[in-house]
Image (spheres, rainbow, N blue to C red):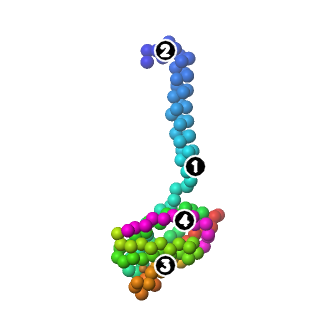
Amino acid sequence: MAMSGRVRHGVHVVVLTGALVACGWPLLRSTVAQDQGPVAKPFAVTARRYKFEPARIEVVQDDLVKIELKTEDIAHSWTVDAYRIAKRVSPGHPVTFEFRADKAGTFPFYCDLKTEDGCRQMRGELVVKPHK
Ligand SMILES: [Cu+2]
C-alpha cells in the first residue's frame, strides 16, 4: 500500500482492471450458461396402487418438463397420449425423462399396464397453460 500514494495513475488502472475482472467475467459466464438452454422444470411423480402422486401437473406452454417417475409397489406406466409419452417404471428402477410441453390444454395421464385391474383407476391430468 506504500506505492499507492506515489503512483496514483497506475493505481487507477489497476482499480479499473480489477473492476472489469470482478464484474465483467461473471456477466460473461452467466451469458454462456443461458446459451445452454432453459432449465427443465422437475416433477417427482410417484405411482402406487392405484394412483399417481401428484395427480395434477401444471406447467406453462413450451416449458421443458422433467418427470422423475418411480413406483412404490408394482410396475406402472405414465402415459399421455397427446404427447405420445408412455414411460414404464418398475420397482427399484426410477426413470427420468424430459419433454417440451408445446401443446396447450388439459391432457389425461394414466397407467396403461394391464397387470392389475386397479391400474385403470390410475388417472391424473397434465395442465399446460397457454402463453399469456
Ligand atoms: Cu399401474
Q: Amino acid at mark 3?
A: Tyr
What's the distance in space between the residues labelled 1 and 3, CA to CA? 35 Å
Which residue is located at x 46 percent, y 79 percent? Answer: 111
What residue does disc 1 label? 35
Residue 74 position, x and y percent, is 36, 77
The residue carrying mark 3 is 110
Q: Earlier in the sequence, mark 1 or mark 3?
A: 1
Residue at the spot x=57%, y=62% of the render? 63
Splitting the image into four quadrants, where does ligand 1 fall? bottom left
Q: Mark 2: which secondary structure?
A: helix
Secondary element type, mark 1: helix
Does any atom of ligand 1 lie closer than 8 Å to the CB of label 2? Answer: no
The answer for how far apart the CA atoms under marks 4 and 2 are is 61 Å
Q: Position of residue 34 (x, y in %)?
A: 56, 49
Q: Amino acid at mark 4?
A: Phe
| Mark identifier at residue 99 | 4
Along the line of sight, the residue nearer the viewer: 58 or 110: 110
Q: Is residue 130 magenta?
A: no
User: Dot 3 lies on which element?
Assistant: strand
Q: Farthest right residue?
A: 132
In depth, the one of 62 and 73 nearer the eye is 73
Q: Disc 2 marks which amino acid? A: Gly
Disc 1 crowd rating (10 Å Cα; few below 14, some 14-19, many 20+) is: few
Label 3 vs 2, first from the N-terminus: 2
| Magenta stretch bounds | 93-105
Q: Residues within 10 Å of mark 2 (few under 14, many from 20)?
A: few
Residue 23's x, y, as percent?
A: 53, 35
Name the mark on residue 5.
Answer: 2
Q: Residues within 10 Å of mark 3 (few under 14, many from 20)?
A: many
Distance from the alpha carbon under mark 2 to that under mark 1 = 44 Å
